[in-house]
Image: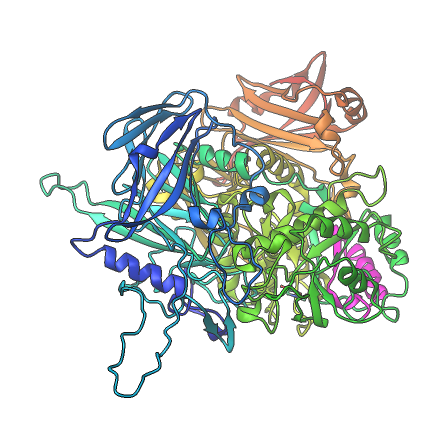
Amino acid sequence: MVKFGSGIAVKHENFKTCDQAGFCKRNRAYADAAGVTGWEAPFRIAADTLNWQNGQLQGTILKTIKEGETVRLPVTISFLESGSARVVIDEEKRQKGEIELRHNSIARKERYNEAESWAIVGGLDISKTAKENREEKTSTITYGSENQFEAVVTFAPFAIDFKRDGATQIKLNDRGLLNLEHWRPKIEKVEPEKKEGEETPPTEVEVPTGEDESTWWDEPFGGQTDSKPKGPESVSLDITFPGYEHVFGIPEHAGPLSLKETRGGTGNHEDPYRLYNADVFEYIMDSPMTLYGSIPFMQAHKKDSTVGVFWLNAAETWIDIIKAKEAHNPLSLGIGSKTDTKTHWFSESGLIDVFIFLGPTPKDVTKAYGELTGYSQLPPEFSIAYHQCRWNYNTDEDVKDVDRKMSKHQIPYDVIWLDIEYTDDKQYFTWDPLTFPDPIGMLKQLDESERKLVAIIDPHIKNKEGYHVVDELKKKDLAVHNKDGNIYEGWCWPGSSHWIDCFNPAAIKWWIGLFKYDAFKGSMPNLFIWNDMNEPSVFNGPETTMPKDNLHYQNWEHRDVHNLNGMTFHNATYQAMLERKKGEIRRPFVLTRSFYAGSQRLGAMWTGDNQANWEHLAAGFPMIINQGVAGYPFAGADVGGFFGNPEKDLLTRWYQAGAFYPFFRGHAHIDTRRREPYLAGEPYTGIITQALRLRYALLPAWYTAFHEASVNGTPILRPHYFVYPADEAGFAIDDQFFVGSTGLLAKPVVKEGAESVDIYLPDNEVYYDYFDYKTYSGRGSHSVAAPLEKIPLLMQGGHIIPRKDRPRRSSGLMKWDPYTLVVALDKQGNAEGELYVDDGETFDYESGAYIKRAFGFKDNVLESTNRGTKGKMTSSYIKAMKAVGVERIVIVGAPKSWSTKAVVKIGKTEARLEYHPESGGKAAWAVIKSPKISIAEDWKIEF
Ligand code: NOJ
């Protein structure tokens, strides 16, 4: 596991602790009060309101606020065809608009109910087979494809137990922490006038409830005050995973994959995990502090069982985690203790809207979550190659120079990036006329080697008269408003700015227009986009973001939608990049910093402003792996570290690590020294080049993993628990991982001066060193040598890995290159693998223009079989791809009997076999050169 050092630098005082966030403090206090004996949870279902119809149970929960006085909360529990369940709780008064807002606010009165329209894209079909069985105090619903699931709804206090095959997996409101702060009018405490000679009359106050009201009506922080026109409105629920020791997910935080406890104590966090997208300057390690994006999706895992929950709420959210060890019967010595993970979720506003996934495998859970929020984009192929970025390449000549030097040093790269300085005075969609006089010339040079440019475009629009973009934004009224309904003004890179409101369909439409080639002068098809600062980052705003009482489209408060904001901007840019010229429909590539559940459909994310030190290098993998667990695998960290100047060994190790980031980009702060790979000097430049070439050689395997993620949500970097759900020793491992289904097991070095790493093997299969075929076998830890030039990378026996070995300047130039297949035999002498190929840039694959192959080695026969389904473009694509061959097949772990074999049979022809015997702990291997077979066709090779 990655060890996280304690950090420095973050300006903690800029960000709230739980104690400083009114609703967080209140809900924690509520949890503490609920823990006291005699506590009675005040929420119950009014049984006479219950109605079961078409897979849904609807009714009203009553919240008792004082003797005889209740608040009505409509509840809907839906059982979905997919086997997931959903619980939604609203508040009748707010739903009907029967409330009064303070300060003459024009904000919407309802609890925000549109998160679904942004996050969810499918999977909501209601089950036709779910059945209800009502009893006096409970209602039991049986559901799932084989009726294997059960939800037992208890009426008073309201609670639900979710079971799989009769055993409880998830409990809602087991601890009675369900809370929904109902609407109430503010009762001003006026000091009544005292007439002479009269006694002081009693002040009109609410019956004391013991609640902390100090932050109900307005909330100051950092010199600014949130006007809170709707009063207190938080929602909260406890979710318990009985028998589960590990929980994963809820990115984005810098910390280990297996989430820690949060209510203090040795080794635990003091604060809950926070989700409130923010531009956290120089963030620290091992912290539950919020970062740039949030995905409120959690997986709980125990031996052979994974379940999950998705908390669909876009407001500021905190999650407390405690792990309760329950001692077993002392007579059953040796069993150890059983751990329940108890979580407590609270959001500042909005609905309670929670999805339940009952597994049983991690794959089932990610698949079900992806069915709802969408699977990861199948990105254009160039975007999974290497990206060269810094803040900033200073001129178009500078870009061209770097491009030439990368070629000269034979260092592959696909994309060079421009940060904010390329613009004319931080006005997006313009170029600085002095430094970038000829963007088209620059783009054309890149295009000669099929390279691309990514330029940054942020959501803040410079407030400067005569700048056409801001003029239109104002005229069309497409910006975010302040609480009074006027255009909101704040500070960001350009100085005074306004923010496009991408919740507004008209704003999206306008944004799309800005990217057309004739509108964005100086752009070309090989220009792509980077969306940064979309939390949104507002330099002079509370917690460096927008005031919560700002208003978005249709007057939803920013408070309600904050965590969605980044995704809506990313979405608008994605839409814009789909078709910049009529008919030219291509897959967009848009990088985002801020994200929410669903952002995976739109492009890549990166972990923001890390630092050039070993702790940050080590922190990258747990964070990126966790992104994959949360359905968003197209993730990376700034290679080299954003702030500071990395020593050369750190830079080198970072490239070796980066070669295993799904999104692989070098980036650096404006104040750092230049660090393009060719500047490092030998041996560093050579080693970095090798790491880059390794990535390029394995692009077919990476692309196949991206394809898999795009159809069923499987992570690209797979943690141990995901691949070996029964192997308890692997559950918390987050510094080594499998790449897709390739059987590649990597543990890049992230420690200063390390000369070896200990790799944990989860089974007794044979593992081969990727580079020299040294073998490792036996479950447990193995030391693998890792001098600076070496990336610890093993191939698990039983896999066939597709590669392209010819070094090129860019991935685009590899399109027609032949493949190498590496067959790593398992102990039984078998292996399997997969390859997915398409044109890498259009959507033709949706019409069948792709190749999907299954490779199998069994009984001395290697075979390629078709796994694609036919579409209207299949034949023409396959025909064009027939020319792409396999130039080499390497069989690792080749049997001794082959030492006398000189040829193999391929249909009616033969090919030469070259055998290399086992030596010095290195497996025997054999190679077939030029077998003259196509990647697009069926074939069989007999050994
Ligand atoms: C903040 C981003 O995180 C960083 O990557 C970028 O270089 C700067 N903004 C400047 O645009």
Quadrant including the C terminus: top right
Q: Position of residue 255 (x, y in %)?
A: 44, 58
Asked if residue 417 is among those painted magenta in the image, a careful observer would answer: yes
Relative to 114, residue 4 above or below:
below
Q: Is residue 123 above or below residue 900?
A: below
Please tell me how many numbered marks the rendered image carries: 0
Which residue occupies 49% across, 37% down?
A: 369
**In the image, residue 862 lies at what x, y percent?**
60, 21
Q: Residue furthest left?
A: 331
Q: Is residue 488 visible?
A: yes
Q: Which residues are magenta?
A: 395-424
Q: Is residue 129 above or below residue 66?
A: above
Give the answer, above or below, for where 315 lies relative to 482. above
Q: How is the image coloured?
A: rainbow
Residue 701 lies within the magenta run? no
Q: Which quarter holds ligand 1?
A: bottom right
Q: Quadrant of residue 909?
A: top right
Nearer the observer, 148 or 175: 175
Residue sitting nearer the eye, 625 or 376: 376
